[in-house]
Image: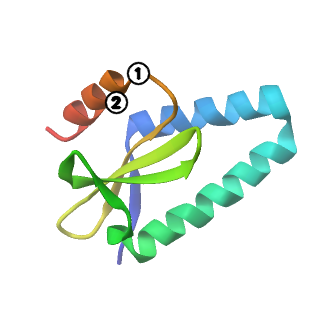
Amino acid sequence: MKEIQWSSVAEKDYDSVLQYLFDNFGKSTVEDFQKKLEHTLNIILQNPFAFRFYKRKNIRKCVFNSQLSIYYLIEKDETIFLLSLFGKQNPSTLKRIIRKLTK
């Protein structure tokens, strides 16, 4: 059975996004974000190949919204390894994160 495993980077990204949304927009926005993310992750689970490649052929990118993309790796056993929830940050930071996590 397919499952999603979160990297420590993705967990930190998630926590940061939740904190930012709560501080700036409140609890209802956080709840809406969590529902939408859960829905999107379910789509990824059901059809992990639906989203386009990101630079390296084994990494996929799902554009979540205009500020955030989900980067993930599909393992041989079809486990989905969530690399990062990456917002509008320096692209070289993302490249460094992906290199580190995919060694």
Instruction: Name which quarter of the figure residue 19 lies in.
Output: top right
What residue is disc 2 on? 94
Is 48 positioned to the left or the right of 56 in the image?
Answer: right
The residue that disc 1 covers is 90
Mark 1 packing: few (<14 Cα in 10 Å), some, or many (20+)? few
Mark 1: amino acid: Asn
> Where is residue 69 drawn, in percent x and y?
48, 45
Front residue of 100/68: it is 68
Task: Work out whether 84 lies above or below 51.
Answer: above
Q: For label 2, count other residues whose C-alpha is less than 10 Å away and answer few (under 14), some (14-19) or many (20+).
A: some
Quarter of the figure that contains the C terminus: top left
Residue ID at (22%, 31%): 100
**Tag 2's secondary structure?**
helix
The type of residue carrying mark 2 is Leu
Quadrant in the rendering for residue 15? top right
**Of tags 2 and 1, which is closer to the observer?**
1
Tell me how far mark 2 sits from mark 1, CA to CA: 7 Å
Residue in the image at 54% along x and 41% along y: 68
Q: Quadrant of the N terminus?
A: bottom left
Name the residue rendered at 66%, 58% in the picture: 36
Q: Indicate which disc residue 40 carries.
A: none
Residue at position x 74%, y 34% from top? 21
Check contact, mark 2 vs mark 1: CB within 8 A: yes
In this rendering, the answer to whether 74 lies above or below 49 is above
Report the side of 86 relative to 2 (left or right).
Answer: right
Q: Is residue 95 left or right of residue 84?
A: left
Color encoding of the figure: rainbow
Q: Position of residue 92 (x, y in %)?
A: 30, 23
Residue 80 lies, in percent from the top left, at 34, 60
